[in-house]
Amino acid sequence: MSNRKRVNIYLVAGIRAAEPEFRPLAEALKSRFEQEQMTVTIRVLFPYGGGNENLFKQAKAVRRDIRLYPEQVQQSAGGQEARRLVRTLGARDPVLLIGCGSGGAAAYHAAELLERDGIDVRFIVQVGSPKVPIGGRFQERVGYIAKKGVWLEGDSLPWQGGWSHAKYRFSSHRYPGLLYNAREKGRRFYAPGNVAMLDIEGQYPNFFSPKAGRGSVSNLAKTINAIWEWFYSAEPRPSPFNETKPGSSST
C-alpha cells in the first residue's frame, strides 16, 4: 500500500446539486483508480453553496464567474471557495478536479489559484459545463465532456453545448467579451485542449448513470473512460509560482 501512487479527487458541484448525485461517479472512480494500484481520496465540494442556499444568489455568482478571463480568476467566487476547501481538506498529493455542471467554472478557476499556491494540479475535467475561457498554461490539462449533439434532451440551461469542431460561436448577450476576443485571436484561443462529445442518453446528471446508455456501455462508463484516459496521460509539471530558490531547502 505504501508504494501506491496517491491522488486527491475533488468533485466540484454546481448549483442545484446534492451529494447523492455524485455517489455513482465517486464509487466508479475509486474502483478504477484502485485497479491501477493507486490510493485515492474523493470528496465533493459545493463552492456555490448546497441545496439549501438561495438559488438566485448561486446563479448570480455562476453567471459572473463564467464571464471571467484567466487573468481575472482572483475575482471568481466559486474558484476562491473551491480553492479554500481543497487547501482545508488536503492537497499534498496530485489533485484531479472534476467540475460538474456549473461547477466546471469553479474547478478551472480553483486550479489556476491552487497552482499559484504550489499545488500539483494534474488535470481538470468539466462535465456538462459552461464554456469558460481557459488560459494557455492549462489548456492541455483541461478536458471538456458534453453530450454528442446540440444539448441534453429537456435541459433548460442555456450554456449547454460543446467546443467541438468549428462551433466556437458565442452570442453577444452571453459572452460579450469572448466574442470580441474570438474574432481578434482566433476561435480556439480560449478553448480547452481536450474535448469528448459522448453519445449518452438522458438529462444531467445522467453523465453518471450506471444504467442509461446506448449499446452495452453506460453513460457512467463512458464518462469514467474519458476522465481516466486524460488523467493517465497527464504529466506532472512543477508550478511556475513555487520554484525552489537557490540556497533554499525543499521539504
Image (cartoon, helix red, strand yellow):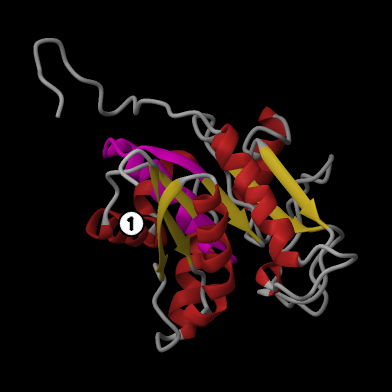
Q: Residue 134, image x and y in percent?
A: 56, 41
Residue plotted at (66% across, 40% down): 180
Work out whether 14 lies above or below 197.
below
Q: Residue 129, image x and y in percent?
A: 63, 60
Residue plotted at (88% across, 67% down): 214
Residue 224 versus residue 206: which sits nearer the camera?
224
Q: Residue 27, image x and y in percent?
A: 53, 67
Q: Residue 176, image x and y in percent?
A: 64, 52
Q: Which residue is mark 1?
A: 80
Name, please, the residue furthest toward the right: 215
The range drawn in magenta is: 98-123
Where, by quadrant of the figure, is residue 201 drawn?
bottom right
Q: Is residue 197 visible?
A: yes
User: Would you call the spot at circle 1 few (<14 residues within 10 Å), some (14-19), or many (20 or more)?
Assistant: many
Inspect the image, locate mark 1, and give the three-letter code of the amino acid beneath it. Gln
Q: Quadrant of the C terminus?
A: top left
Left or right of residue 239: residue 15: right
Residue 43 versus residue 178: which sits nearer the camera?
43
Where, by quadrant of the figure, is residue 193 drawn?
top right
Q: Is residue 139 visible?
A: no
